[in-house]
């Protein structure tokens, strides 16, 4: 997908939804007190990214309730008996991850309804019973699996994986190695590494890394700093974000040719308003909070094609959720779409074969350690298209 805009691309290996603790959702859930809540937008404001194209076919997919049933009826395509049977193993009734599982499942089901090339069986499973539920699904004829969602459940299941299984999280290093266990996920560290690559490719030589005090910002900053040092052989300038002492930040920015923001959207907006307009500013998808953010106009950032390239055929093929979501939560829905599409490819691939996908979450390619690598496009805040 991103080959259409080659100057905007930087390769990267991403993992996603990695919790700080084994059962704690990562920032995409933490940044939403209620992940299913509607994205509020004041009347008359214009989204800074191109709106989703009108759906002609198929109809938009509806999201399930936050506490779905333990299993859903198998989806059977209208064009005859399916060749592939996909098991979707998620913690649907988990208090911590149930809402995330509901959004992921909606994306998977939306892709299944569009492509109609597999039978989909939804199974509720937690860390305690994931092995039992997995074995039952395989015994029932499932030949490829999407899930689990938490690192704890993945580690528990790893020794028992017998069919191609696409985990929706990173796999702990101490988990049992298994040639049939794969990872499709996304963590903030991956985006930070890509941001460093993008800035280097844009010719930035002396960036200032601005870092918030929260744990997420610290994680972003460390990954960016490590990657910048690897790419350039020197450390990036670094300054802590202090809203009560912006003059110190402005003075530090005078020594830099660009800014890299390890901040949330609110912090970034306040800082951007105080900067000289000609200083290049960069950020990750953390800044894309949805709606109109004029205070961040001009910031160069990276994000999914789902948001940045809505008119691309591989994106507009799939329906948007009918229930409005926050921009962060909608990434789970897009992840579900690509998880289904990858599962279909994996079911039909020979062991060791190259697996690639022009995905709605990025250009996906199976890399080393059975982790799917991703290429993301870059956009500019305040514009309606890639620049």
Image (cartoon, rainbow, N blue to C red):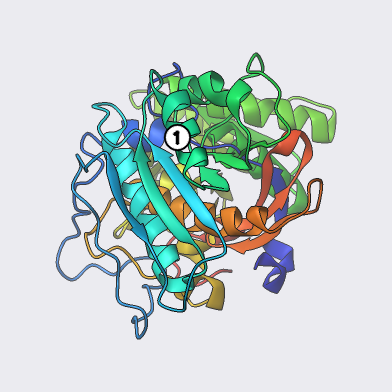
Q: With 300 as the anchor, is 126 left or right in this view?
A: left
User: Would you name the residue on which mark 1 appears?
Assistant: 136
Q: With 227 as the anchor, is 331 left or right in this view?
A: left
The image quadrant where one finds the C terminus is: bottom right
Q: Residue at x 40, y 47 (%)?
A: 332
The image quadrant where one finds the N terminus is: bottom right
Q: Residue at x 62, y 21 (%)?
A: 159
Q: Residue at x 45, y 52 (%)?
A: 336
Q: With 53 as the anchor, is 224 left or right in this view?
A: right
10 Å crowding of disc 1: few (<14), some (14-19), many (20+): few
Q: How many marks?
A: 1
Between residue 297 and residue 375, name the one nearer to us: 375
Q: Is residue 243 above or below residue 22?
A: below
Where is residue 42 shown, x and y percent of the image?
16, 61
Between residue 202 and residue 139, name the one nearer to us: 139
Residue that sits furthest to the bottom in the current view:
56
Where is residue 236 shown, x and y percent of the image?
70, 28
Q: Residue at x 34, y 82 (%)?
A: 54
């Amino acid at each position: 997908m991103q080959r259409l805009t080659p100057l905007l691309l930087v390769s990267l290996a991403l993992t996603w939804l990695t919790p700080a603790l084994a059962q704690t959702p990562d920032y995409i859930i933490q940044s939403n007190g209620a992940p299913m809540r509607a994205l509020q937008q004041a009347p008359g404001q214009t989204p800074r990214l191109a709106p989703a194209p009108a759906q002609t076919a198929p109809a938009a997919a509806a999201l399930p309730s936050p506490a779905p049933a333990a299993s859903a009826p198998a989806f059977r395509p209208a064009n005859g008996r399916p060749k592939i049977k996909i098991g979707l193993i998620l913690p649907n009734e988990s208090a911590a991850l149930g809402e995330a599982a509901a959004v992921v499942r909606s994306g998977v089901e939306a892709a299944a309804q569009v492509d109609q090339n597999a039978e989909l069986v939804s199974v509720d499973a937690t860390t305690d019973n994931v092995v039992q539920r997995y074995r039952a699904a395989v015994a029932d004829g499932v030949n490829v699996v999407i899930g689990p969602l938490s690192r704890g459940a993945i580690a528990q299941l790893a020794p028992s994986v017998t069919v191609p299984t696409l985990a929706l999280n990173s796999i702990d290093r101490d988990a049992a190695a298994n040639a049939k266990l794969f990872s499709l996920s996304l963590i903030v560290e991956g985006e930070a590494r890509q941001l460093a690559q993008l800035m280097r490719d844009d010719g930035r030589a002396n960036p200032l890394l601005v870092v918030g005090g929260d744990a997420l910002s610290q994680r972003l900053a460390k990954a960016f700093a490590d990657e910048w040092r690897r790419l350039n052989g020197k450390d990036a300038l670094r300054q802590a974000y202090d809203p009560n002492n912006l003059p110190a930040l402005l003075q530090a920015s005078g020594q830099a040719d660009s800014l890299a923001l390890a901040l949330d959207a609110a912090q970034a907006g306040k800082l951007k308003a105080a900067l000289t307009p000609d200083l290049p500013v960069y950020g990750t998808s953390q800044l894309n909070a949805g709606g109109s953010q004029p205070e961040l106009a001009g910031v160069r950032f990276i994000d999914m094609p789902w948001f940045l390239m809505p008119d691309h055929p591989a994106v507009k093929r799939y329906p948007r959720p009918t229930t409005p979501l926050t921009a962060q939560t909608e990434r789970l829905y897009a992840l579900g779409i690509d998880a289904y599409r990858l599962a279909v490819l994996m079911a039909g691939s020979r062991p060791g074969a190259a697996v690639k996908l022009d995905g709605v979450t990025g250009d996906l390619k199976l890399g080393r350690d059975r982790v799917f690598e991703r290429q993301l496009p870059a956009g500019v805040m305040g514009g309606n298209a890639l620049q």
